[in-house]
Image: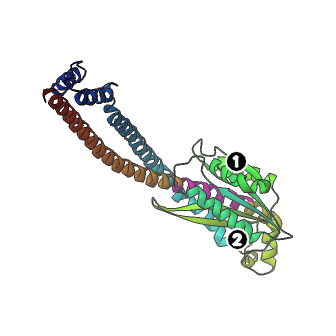
Amino acid sequence: MAMAALRREGRRFLLSPISPNPSTAARSAMLSEDLSPLGTRSISTQVVRNRMKSVKNIQKITKAMKMVAASKLRAVQSRTENSRGLWQPFTALLGDTPSVDVKKNVIVTITSDKGLCGGINSTSVKISKSLYKLISGPEKETRYVLLGEKGKVQMVRDSKSSIEMTITELQKNPLNYTQVSVLADDILKNVEYEALRIVFNKFHSVVSFLPTVSTILSPAVAERESESGGKLGDLDSYEIEGGESKAEVLQNLAEFQFSCVMFNAVLENACSELGARMSAMDSSSRNAGEMLDRLTLTYNRTRQASITTELIEIISGASALTG
């Protein structure tokens, strides 16, 4: 209130028509023009206050998103660890042969539908593009099957002609094996392949995930590898019951293997996404706190400078009138 009273008195003195000499009148006119628009000095502090309010709101949002991701991660992580037991027997039986040379390859890239999770989606897309260049050739055909909105957005830019299928909103509902098996069956019915290569992020910890490629061979290629005595050569040592032929057994095994690996890959990628989002939101909250500290310091300095300037102008105006 004292500062407001001083400001009012200073304005009354400076706007007074009495002027003892021309120099004093000119100085009074200049100061009165500076002070005429109300709130001119407070505009800088107002901008800083608005910025501080925005940063505080952003910090609240990032902290809330981190807590939500942490709560979801605990639920998905246990399911992911349990799902690893589904595909491991298939790897022991049929193997994982990423170096197999086939003419028809399908790259299944698993990404997320939402962002704000670091570079997890960009990593999957980069791995998929590098794999595409590696396995492509003059007499070979390579196609993409994309799971997730973020992977679709990035791949459409320069690889639109090579995309066979796109599937989004996979994580809109809680993931289960039935949902993924129906999805895997839909992929097998709509694409022709000799090798399916699934690109996903394998979850290690909240701050660590490993880009992984799993290879699933078609029944014909698997039988060819088995007959040639490669990594699938031990398959002949098993006894087949039920009167089914080897080709039929391999067909069933390939379909079941694909659904199991897909189920585990989707859960692994979901865990990696939530862990990356936790880390990203934690970093964002810390950065918002640091920015808020800097803005607070700037606000205090600006406010102090404004008060000092007003006092100087009032004293200078009073001195000019009395002098």
Residue beneath disc 2: 94
Type of the residue with mark 2: Leu
- Is the N terminus in the top left, top right, bottom left or bottom right quadrant? top left
Whether label 1 touches label 2, CB < 8 Å: no
Residue that appears at 86% across and 70% down: 139
Spatial CA distance of label 1 from label 2 is 28 Å
- Is the C terminus in the top left, top right, bottom left or bottom right quadrant? top left
Q: Which one is in front, 244 or 231?
A: 231
Q: Position of residue 98 (x, y in %)?
A: 70, 72
In the current view of this chain or complex, which residue is farthest to the left?
322
Magenta stretch in the rendered image:
255-272
Q: Position of residue 292 (x, y in %)?
A: 33, 45
Q: Which one is in front, 301 or 305?
A: 305
Choose the circle earlier in sequence order: 1 or 2.
2
Residue beneath disc 1: 167
State whether residue 319 is above or below residue 258. Answer: above
* Residue 4 occupies quadrant: top left
SS of the residue under disc 1: strand
State whether residue 157 is above or below residue 236. Answer: above
Left or right side of 82 for 61: left
Q: Position of residue 163 (x, y in %)?
A: 76, 54
Display colour scheme: rainbow
State whether residue 183 is above or below residue 33. Answer: below
Magenta stretch encompasses residue 256: yes
Left or right side of 3 for 26: right
SS of the residue under disc 2: helix
* Residue 3 occupies quadrant: top left
Q: Which one is in front, 234 or 285?
A: 285
Determine if residue 293 is in view: yes
Magenta stretch encompasses residue 58: no
Q: Residues within 10 Å of mark 1 (few under 14, many from 20)?
A: some
